[in-house]
Amino acid sequence: MPFVSVDLSDQDWDRFLESTPHGQFQQSSCWACAKAVEGWRAIRAAYSDGGRIIGGFQILCRASRLGRMGFLPKGPVTVDERALPLDGIVRRVIAMAKDHGLAAIVVQPAEKNPVSDSLFAGYGFSPNILVPVVARTHLLDLSCGMDKIISNMRRTHSLNIRQARSRGLKIREGSAGDIDLFFRLMVSTCERQEKRPIPSTAAGLLRVWNAFHERHLIRLNIAEADGKAIAAGLTLLFGKRATLWKKGWSGEGNQYHPNNMVTFEAIEWAQQRGFETFDFADMALPLADTLLSGGRPTEEMKRCVSFFNLGYGGYSLRVPDAFVHIRNPVLRFVYRRGAGVPWMRKLARAVLER
């Protein structure tokens, strides 16, 4: 039986996650602390062998109009599925959801996690339409060294970075006192893209900063021209992966190529400090699937942020699908029948987001 905890902070669990290639920040107690400001609460199950954690999972829960919901991102996590059978972990996820009164739980495994789609289906899970999740991402291998990374970059990116430096663009490391500034830059970007900022407030962003900064797992880099901050990037650091989680740009100083420089400096900083993977956090689905199938991007695809990120090299990756388990068997049946109906998908998400 696993040890079950509802504590927000758990450094033993985080150290386990950082020790395995399957562990990502979304399963960490740092992330649980950051999400608490939005009403999420953590339930954690850790399996141990001889006092050493060998696997487990963290569920984030909060109330919704459909009942109490759970979300298990980037997990479960194990060091060895032979020592810890995966079907037993899936059964434990379902049992814990019941024990804690969850009407439904959404599970999205980590990229390299060996949990199969058929295993989820065998325990009554269905494809997820309730919670929007990242379906594709773009990764950069940092272990090859900066010379190789630079040689693989798009020529225009290399030129823009040289021009940014020659024109006097400076990068400085930010602190908690810069979170309001970064939030304004992020909001400016979101307004141009007609999206809502996540987190939706500077206070929420500060909560993320505080949760990760306590263990030196976050970095803010700010691009300044003529003494004015015009762009910035917030990178989350966990295990051997650096994730460029959020970016912001005022829309000014385009001649300084601030977005090129913010991204490149984050890559260079992470590589020089021994991180092995740089994660761009998300990738536009049509562009990713076009590239993964061997196709050529359309002109419209080339105008998206994801195509900009491709200019640094790396490879696109299909993130495992998410699955949902609904406790009530009648609702589970209705959900399965309606999952393929577009208007029902929109209705379910709209209810959850209220």
Image (tube, rainbow, N blue to C red):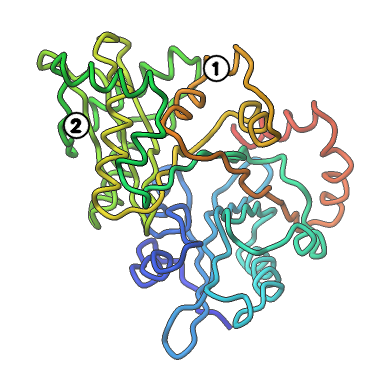
Looking at the picture, tell me which residue is in the foreground, 206 or 234. 234
Secondary structure under the numbered disc 2 in the rendered image = helix
Nearest to N terminus: mark 2 or mark 1: 2
The label on residue 267 is none
The label on residue 302 is 1
Q: Residue at x 72, y 45 (%)?
A: 128
Q: Is residue 158 above or below residue 207?
A: above
Question: x and y percent of residue 162 in the render?
Answer: 23, 21
Q: Quadrant of residue 350?
A: top right
Local crowd size for mark 2, using a 10 Å CA cut-off: few (<14), some (14–19), many (≥20)? some
CA separation in Å, label 2 and label 1: 32 Å
Looking at the picture, tell me which residue is in the foreground, 339 or 8. 339
Q: Which residue is mark 2?
A: 178
Secondary structure under the numbered disc 1 in the rendered image = helix
Question: x and y percent of residue 138 in the render?
Answer: 51, 38
Specify the quadrant that holds the N terminus: bottom right
Specify the quadrant that holds the C terminus: top right
Q: Residue furthest bottom?
A: 50
Q: Is residue 288 above or below residue 140?
A: above
Q: Amino acid at mark 2?
A: Asp
Q: Quadrant of residue 290?
A: top right
Left or right of 209, for residue 138: right
Question: x and y percent of residue 313 in the render?
Answer: 45, 35
